[in-house]
Image (spheres, helix red, strand yellow):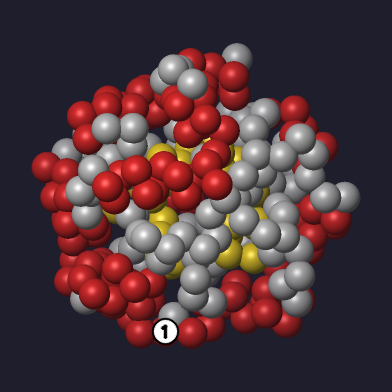
Amino acid sequence: MSVSPLNTKIREANAKGKVALVPYLPAGYPTRERFWEELDKLDAAGASVIEIGMPFSDPVADGPVVEAACLKVLEDGITLQWILDGLRERKGRYNAALLLMGYLNPVLQYGPERFARACAEGGVSGLIIADMPIDEAGFLTDALKPHNVELIPLVGLNTSRERLEMYAKDAGGFVYMVSVLGTTGQRDSLPARVKEKLAEVREVFDIPVALGFGLKHPDQVAPFAGLMDAAVIGSALISHIEAGGDAASYMDIWTS
């Protein structure tokens, strides 16, 4: 299979001496209309990958900021079909690679094969399922691979070396290193163990390494130079929009 656009876009940023930016926004947030405007702004501001949250009523991996945003869009009637239709209509519009993030139940309800096909039709290159270990996801990988959609592995501070090596065998796109134990959300500092674990992940995987959960300012990633290729930013972006800002002004914090 050809190299994933996720890999390519992250490496393009790295080749310019930059950490690739992977902003996260729930589908339909803050409103149906503004969501697409904010996606355009993220793309124009230089996002390498845009991670779009699929709506779900029980987002167990998400902290209060993301959970509140997800519940809001559900109340607004946002569905998985809505985001897939919208992406299909806009296929080819974005320079950034596109990634969907969510939970297993909506994908199962939609049907893995049908979902994989819809991802390809919408220009989606990758998928994160927060509540399913990669080693239990063979049926989903089998559905995604023919459509060149990568299932992105999530690894954490407590992921064993043995499990890292197992994940690395079939991984594509990038590997997502979770910086904290617990849910998503902004934090002023990251655990001291992150640097050590990033080095181990870097050693095992031959694809880009992204760091996420808890990031709100570029100063937080400076200590990990050379160990990470991409930064995933979600809760801080949502909080910025909630406070009256927009994606463009938030991305300025990371690109200036």
The quadrant in which residue 15 appears is: top right
233 horizontally vs 100: left or right: right
Q: Residue at x 66, y 44 (%)?
A: 214
In the image, is residue 236 above or below residue 89?
above
The crowding category of the residue bearing disc 1, from other C-alpha atoms within 10 Å (few below 14, some 14 to 19, many at least 20), is few
Q: Which residue is pictured at 64% across the width and 65% down the height?
A: 155
* Image: 102 above or below 22: below
Residue 233, horizontal then vertical, whole percent = 55, 39
Where's the N terminus, which quadrant? Answer: bottom left
Compared to residue 131, the image places residue 67 above or below, namely: above
Please tell me whether residue 9 is drawn above or below residue 219 in the rendered image: below
Q: Position of residue 67 (x, y in %)?
A: 47, 49
Residue extending farthest front: 75
Residue on which the image places disc 1? 138
- Judging depth in this view, the residue of 93 and 156 nearest the camera is 156
Instruction: State the residue at coordinates (12%, 42%).
Output: 89
> Looking at the image, can residue 80 be seen?
yes
**Circle 1: residue type:** Gly
Quarter of the picture containing the C terminus is top right
Q: In the rendered picture of this protein, how many numbered marks are placed on residues?
A: 1
As helix, strand or loop, the secondary structure at mark 1 comes to helix
